[in-house]
Image (cartoon, coloured by chain):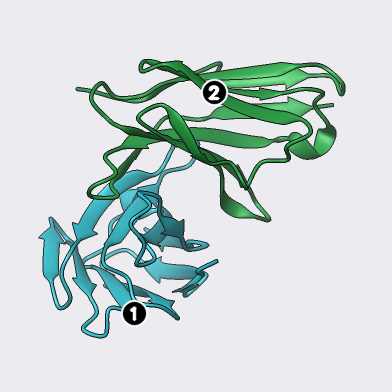
């Protein structure tokens, strides 16, 4: 049963620290997405990749967030430095560009104190 | 960018009742998708629709791609407690970009 995996599931850190979240997309999928979910904002698209190339990262605060896909089995989202307003659940999803279906991971719950 | 208006924002129903929710857009979509998010989990794809007028079922769930291509509906029949969660609609926004626009979700509470 193929699934998107994300690590860590929970992260508590202090303001100013670097946070790295990792995602393993489903093998064979050619698109990868990073979303942020808060009570106030719903599901917010941060960045997405097709065939490992970044296509859109307009949803990310550029000064502190970065997203990469070093290879087809790993996507990373980094926040440096982290701030309390970054506290949220971060989801990775993968899919096929042709049919728009997305398969979400379980999320990383980030708390920045 | 494109926005989806999803309604209602929340619903409180009795177990056994039927549920209807919908999603509208100001622009034409070529794909509509419905997801469900359980508490503490990521959204799960329920139904995907690719053709105007298409009606697709998945167990007690039925979704329709509106004929105008600017709306979609999700119905749940004979609700049960495990239907509790947030239901999101999503669409391609008529683009070929591979990414979806998501609605803000409908939160469903089912009282036993």
Query: Which residue appears at 22% of the width and 55% of the height?
Result: B47
In front here: B15 or A95?
A: A95
Q: Which chain is cyan?
A: B
Q: Position of residue A18 (x, y in %)?
A: 76, 16
Q: Position of residue B52 (x, y in %)?
A: 17, 76
Q: Which residue is mark 1?
A: B70
Q: Is residue A1 above or below residue B65?
A: above
In front here: B108 or A64?
A: A64
The CA span between labels 1 and 2 is 34 Å
Query: Which residue appears at 25% of the width and 51% of the height?
Result: B46
Q: Which residue is mark 2?
A: A68
Nearest to viewer (mark 1 / mark 2)? 2
Q: Is residue A101 above or below residue B15?
A: above
Q: Position of residue B49 (x, y in %)?
A: 20, 62
Colour of chain A, in one word, is green
In front here: A68 or A21?
A: A68
């Amino acid at each position: 049963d193929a699934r998107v995996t994300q690590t860590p599931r929970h992260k508590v850190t202090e303001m100013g620290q670097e946070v790295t979240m990792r995602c393993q997309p489903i093998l064979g999928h050619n698109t990868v997405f990073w979303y942020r979910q808060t009570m106030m904002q719903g599901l917010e698209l941060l960045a997405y990749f097709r065939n490992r190339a970044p296509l859109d990262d307009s949803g990310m605060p550029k000064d502190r967030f970065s997203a990469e896909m070093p290879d087809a089995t790993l996507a990373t989202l980094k926040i440096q430095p982290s701030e309390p307003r970054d506290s949220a659940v971060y989801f990775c999803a993968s899919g096929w560009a042709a049919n728009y279906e997305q398969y979400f991971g379980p999320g990383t719950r980030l708390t920045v104190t | 960018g494109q926005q989806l208006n999803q309604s209602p924002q929340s619903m409180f129903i009795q177990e056994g009742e039927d549920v209807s929710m919908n999603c509208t857009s100001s622009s034409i979509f070529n794909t509509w998708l419905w997801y469900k998010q359980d508490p503490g989990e990521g959204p799960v794809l329920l139904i995907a629709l690719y053709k105007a007028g298409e009606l697709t079922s998945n167990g007690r769930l039925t979704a329709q791609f509106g004929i105008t291509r600017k709306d979609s509906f999700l119905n749940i029949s004979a609700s049960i407690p495990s239907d509790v969660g947030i239901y999101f609609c999503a669409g391609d926004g008529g683009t070929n970009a591979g990414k979806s626009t998501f609605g803000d979700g409908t939160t469903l509470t089912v009282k036993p």
